[in-house]
Amino acid sequence: MTEAVSQPDRPQQFEGGERDLFSKFDELIQMREGLLASGMEDPFGLVMERVLSPTVAVCNGRETILLGTYNYMGMTFDPEVIDAGRTALTDFGSGTTGSRVLNGTYQGHKEVEQALCEFYGMDHAMVFSTGYQANLGIISTIAGKGDYIVLDIDSHASIWDGCKMGDAEVVPFRHNDIEAMEKRLRRIPEGAGKLVILEGVYSMLGDVAPLKEMIAVARANGAMILVDEAHSMGFIGPNGRGVAEEQGVLDDVDFVIGTFSKSVGTVGGFCVSNHPKFEIMRLVCRPYVFTASLPPSVVATAATSIRKLMEAGDKREHLWSNSRKLHKGLKDLGFRLGTDEPQSAIISVIMPDLEKGAAMWEALLHEGLYVNLARPPATPANMTLLRCSLCAEHSEEQVDTIVGMFERAGRATGII
C-alpha cells in the first residue's frame, strides 16, 4: 500500500476533474469585479452609440468629447475618404474571401501599397490585415532561431509576440537607453543575425525615441533596424513620415512598420522597405499568407487617406498646437504628466493608483470626456495612466473645454 501524501493547492477543477484554464485570470477578474461592484462604468467596455465626428460621440446617451481614439489626423469622416470606400464597396463587394497570395489581391490592394511607397519614398510596401499582424509577420519571419533581437523593454505587445513566434533570442534593454542597447549588441556572438527594434513614439507615455543615436549604434554593430512608427505616421516629420524622418535617419532604417488604424483612420497594417529582397516576404510570411486580405472598401479609404496626408501640413501644425496647449494646461493645473514637454499627440496623465485612476476616468466621463484608462501590466513601471490622444480636428475651444473638465474632475477626486 502506498503511503498517502498531502497535495498542494490545485487549480480550480470542474466536476469531471478537468483543470479550469481560466484560473490564471482570477486576479484580473477580481479586480474588474471590484471596480464594477462600486457602481462605476466599465472603463474597458465603453459603447459609442453614435459617432458624430472625429472628436465627438454619443456615449451613455450624452454627447462626449473623444480624447482617446488615436484618430490623430481626423480622417475618419473626411468626405473624399468616405466616398472612396463607398464606391469600392459598390464596385467590388464587401470582402475578398481570400488571402493575398490566392484570390485576395484586388486592384485596391496594389493601389494602397503604391500610395505607401510614394508616401515614404521607398521601393516596397506590404499591407497586412491589422497593425498587430504587420509586426507579428515581419518580425517572426526575418528573425528566427539562431538570430538575435535587441529591443526596448517598453515595446508594444505585437512586437513581443512577433519575437516569440519567430523563436529568435530576445535581448531587451532599458527604455530609450542608448548605452544599454550598445552593451547588449556588443555581447551578441560574431556572425549572428541581429535585428534592432525601436518605436518612434511609445504609446503609453507618448515619449519619442532618440532614433538618430540608436540607429547609428545599431549600424556600427552590424544590425538591421526595424522602427514602428504607428503613433507618429501622419503628423511627425516634415512629410508626416514619422520620427525617423524628423531626426533625419529614415534612409538608415531597413523596415518601417505602421498601421492604418491611427492617422490613416481605418484598419490594417503595413511594412515599407528598400531592401532588394523584400518581395520574397509575400511567400514566406505566415500571418500574410494565411490571412484573408482587407476588404476593398477598407483599402480604398486607406489609399485615399494616405494620399491626402501627403498634403496635410496645416493639419499637422494644428495638431502640434493642440498638443502644446493641452500639455501646458494640465501641467499648470498640477497634474503629473508622462513627459516634461509635449513630444507627440499622446499626453499621459499619471494617476496615484488604479482606484484613483478609475475614479478620475469616471468623473471625466460624467463631465462629457472620454480618455483611455491604462493599467499594469500594459503600462511601464506599473503605472496607472489616463492616456489622452489628441486629434487635428479638435478645436482650440474644445481643448480649453477639456482642460476645464480635467480641473473639475481632478478636484472632485482629490487628485489635484
Image (cartoon, rainbow, N blue to C red):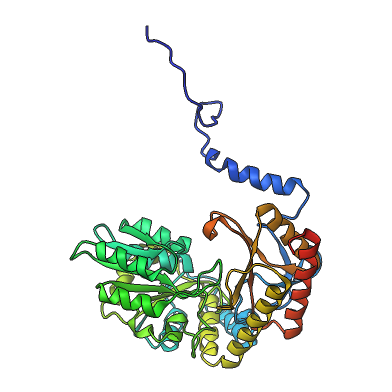
Q: Can you say whether 342 is above or below 175 in the image?
A: below
* 41 left or right, relative to 173: right
Name above or below for residue 149 compared with residue 328. above
Q: Is residue 338 left or right of residue 395?
A: left
Residue shown at the point (55%, 29%) measured from the top left: 14
Say which of 75 and 246 sits in front: 246
Q: Nearer the viewer, residue 312 or 181?
A: 181
User: Is residue 89 in view?
Assistant: yes
Q: Locate the C terminus by quadrant.
A: bottom right
Q: Residue furthest left?
A: 191
Q: Whole-percent x and y of residue 327?
A: 65, 77
With respect to residue 46, does 245 lie above or below?
below
Quarter of image, res 143: bottom left
- Residue 219 position, x and y percent, is 28, 76
Confirm whether residue 103 shows in the render.
no
In which quadrant of the rendered view does residue 220 lie? bottom left
Q: Residue at x 28, y 60 (%)?
A: 144
Q: Residue furthest top?
A: 1
Q: Position of residue 296 (x, y in %)?
A: 51, 76
Q: Is residue 382 left or right of residue 334?
A: left
Image quadrant in which the N terminus is located: top left
Q: Position of residue 324 (x, y in %)?
A: 64, 82
| Most foreground residue, 78 or 179 | 179
User: In which quadrant of the rendered view does residue 284 lie?
Assistant: bottom left
